């Protein structure tokens, strides 16, 4: 009986091992399939997300202009059409389609007429008047400078300078856009006016003043920097000019004490 039981035990053990092997292979297959599905879903999200955000921004801009620009002119068009026609009710197609289209044409015509004031004396007088008003002058001057910066031709505009600045403390750096430069009154050192965009919305950044000798020029382009900031570093270029390269004279001036020469031990 013992001789006959041994083959049965071995066969049962073999069957058990086969079943375990099949279960493990099925588990591995299911895990691989789930990883592929998860990766494909994530890739689909990366495809859809920029499109959705772009459409959302366009919709927000259209809603803003429709509410504060198109609708008031459309109401004016409907009011004028009712007076001309002499009836309170107008065709539905005119109210929903023709009136907004006429309002858009009126806005474009007004903007075209305002274009003649760009280099006129009336424009200069309006600027002088608004720049003399308290509180309004600060806001108007800042907005005017931003709009004038957008009006520069692409071939004449200077390339955007990108730098790395130490923030919030030494050992940590973040990219910043140089908007202008100024000079310190006492030391006459050049200071950089930089705009620091934040992740994931670059328009919600902040403004800093940084000494030029403490900033490091960044080797990224404007598009690469914005993509890296928006993606939280996922699309950052593989190479970055993180450490500043100083000339030997600059390095010696930093290492030299204020009241003497550098002493070397041999």
Image (cartoon, rainbow, N blue to C red):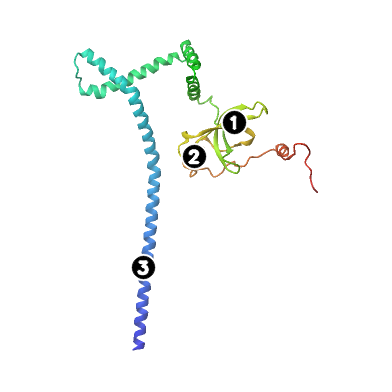
Picture quarter with the N terminus? bottom left
Q: Which numbered disc flags the more N-terminal residue, 1 or 2?
A: 1
Q: CA distance from mark 1 to mark 3?
A: 66 Å
Which residue lies under the disc numbered 2? 229
Is 139 in front, or is 38?
139
Judge depth for marks 1 and 2 and give the one in front. Answer: 1
Residue 45, position in %: x, y? Answer: 38, 45
Name above or below for residue 33 compared with residue 8: above
Q: Could you say which quadrant of the image residue 201 lies in?
A: top left
Residue at the top extreme, as displayed: 121
Please rate how many residues cluster around mark 2, counting C-alpha atoms within 10 Å: few if below 14, some from 14 to 19, many from 20: many
Residue 186 falls in image quadrant: top right
Question: Which x, y percent locates residue 18?
Answer: 36, 72
Q: Give the left or right position of residue 44, taking residue 85 as reference.
A: right
Q: Secondary structure at mark 3?
A: helix
Give the farthest residue toward the front: 134
Residue at 59% across / 31% down in the picture?
A: 192
Q: Residue at x 37, y 56 (%)?
A: 34
Q: Which residue position holds label 3? A: 22
Tell me the element at label 1.
Answer: strand
Badge 1 or badge 3: first in the primary sequence: 3
Quadrant position of residue 106: top left
Mark 1 — residue? Answer: 192
* Left or right for 152, reference 96: right
- For the residue carrying disc 1, how many other residues have a C-alpha within 10 Å: few (<14), some (14-19), or many (20+)? many
What whole-number distance in Å separates the C-alpha atoms at marks 1 and 2?
20 Å
């Amino acid at each position: 009986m013992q001789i006959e039981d041994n083959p049965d035990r071995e066969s049962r053990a073999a069957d058990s091992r086969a079943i375990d092997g099949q279960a493990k292979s099925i588990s591995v297959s299911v895990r691989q399939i789930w990883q592929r599905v998860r990766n494909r879903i994530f890739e689909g999200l990366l495809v859809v997300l920029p499109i959705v955000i772009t459409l959302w921004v366009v919709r927000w801009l259209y809603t803003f202009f429709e509410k504060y620009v198109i609708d008031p002119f459309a109401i004016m068009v409907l009011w004028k059409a009712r007076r001309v026609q002499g009836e309170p009710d107008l065709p539905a197609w005119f109210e929903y389609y023709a009136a907004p289209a006429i309002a858009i044409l009126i806005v474009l015509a007004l903007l075209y007429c305002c274009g003649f004031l760009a280099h006129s004396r009336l424009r200069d007088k309006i600027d002088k008047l608004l720049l003399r008003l308290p509180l309004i002058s600060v806001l108007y001057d800042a907005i005017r400078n931003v709009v004038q910066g957008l009006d520069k031709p692409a071939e004449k505009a200077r390339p955007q300078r990108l730098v790395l600045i130490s923030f919030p403390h030494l050992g940590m750096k973040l990219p910043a856009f140089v908007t202008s430069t100024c000079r310190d009154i006492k030391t006459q050192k050049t200071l950089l006016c930089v705009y620091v965009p934040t992740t994931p919305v670059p328009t919600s950044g902040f403004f800093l003043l940084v000494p030029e000798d403490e900033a490091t020029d960044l080797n990224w382009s404007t598009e690469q920097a914005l993509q890296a900031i928006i993606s939280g570093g996922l699309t950052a270029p593989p190479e970055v000019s993180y450490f500043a390269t100083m000339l030997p004279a600059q390095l010696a001036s930093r290492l030299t004490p204020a009241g003497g020469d550098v002493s070397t031990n041999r």
